[in-house]
Amino acid sequence: MSGQTHTDPNARAVVGAHDLPEGVSVPEVSPIARDGKRRSPAEEARTLVASTTSGTLATLSDDGTPWASLVTFGVMEDGSPVLCLSTLAEHARNLERNRQASLMVADPNHTGEVLAGGRVTLAGRVRRSDEHPDEQSAREAHLEAVPSAAMYADFNDFSFWILDVERARWVGGYGRMDTALAPDYATAEPDPVEPQALDAVTHLNEDHADALLIMAKAFGAHPEASEASCVRADRYGLDLELETPEGTRATRVSFAERVNAPGGLRAATVDLARRAREALQPA
């Protein structure tokens, strides 16, 4: 695949102009997988940012040197990260001189190959909370996410800083990436089922592999599949990995409706399995 770039607008997949590391592959995505509804880049970014309270802040030192620091943050309603920083730290002094910054957040639940995990970089400009029209909400957002900050937040050398996101670059692992601009990022919402998704995937693979295979046969454009496992689950559906006579394939099966509550993933999956069985019944 070297020298070629492929972008799939629904799968949000990009295979860049370079070879993948040895032993790493991006499974073929079937037409149904492309057509299946999935999270937008803005939703992916908001979901990742909501999944943790720490990240890497990038600022510019007075001599132009990029400076990376580990920080904690909370999130305002529009997805703006709120930091609590001390002027004893170089990054806070950097922000006083130059308001440009970015924050990189990595998926805290990912295990295995590091670069196969999800991450997002939020780029923009910062302002102190006293420069924001809703200073109290910024403070509350940080303290809700990082309760321990209450011990030092009112010290004279600490201030709350808000990153106004101008663009978000989401990477979902090898071959999955896209960019979201400020309006889309601000109006998107974190996926409410994300906290339960990992346990749901494990449960489906351990106890309901037969149902996953029925879903793949009915809605995954691979009626010849012999095995199916779930790779990811979100509010819109499931990503499946299939074993077929042609080898390993990937597909997407969608829920009938978007899941809008944290506890709705199980019911949506049960409904998907029911519809798949009905679809395979002889006419």
Image (cartoon, rainbow, N blue to C red):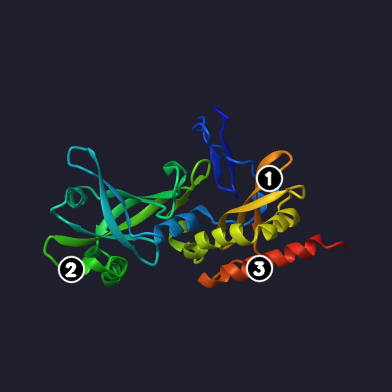
CB under 8 Å between callouts 2 and 3? no
Quarter occupied by residue 216: bottom right
Q: Residues within 10 Å of mark 3 (few under 14, many from 20)?
A: few
Residue indicated by mark 2: 151
Relative depth, front residue between 257 and 108? 108
- The reply to whether residue 234 is in sight is no
Kind of residue sitting beneath label 2: Met
Percent x, y of residue 185: 45, 57
Mark 2 crowdedness (10 Å alpha carbons): few <14, some 14-19, many ≥20: few
Residue that extends furthest to the left in the rendered view of this protein: 156
Out of 37 and 95, give the one closest to the viewer: 37
Per the image, the residue denoted by label 3 is 270
The reply to whether residue 213 is visible in this rendering is yes
Residue at x 51%, y 31% (from the top left corner):
22
Q: Secondary structure at mark 3?
A: helix
Return the mark for residue 243.
Answer: 1
Mark 1 or mark 3, earlier in chain: 1
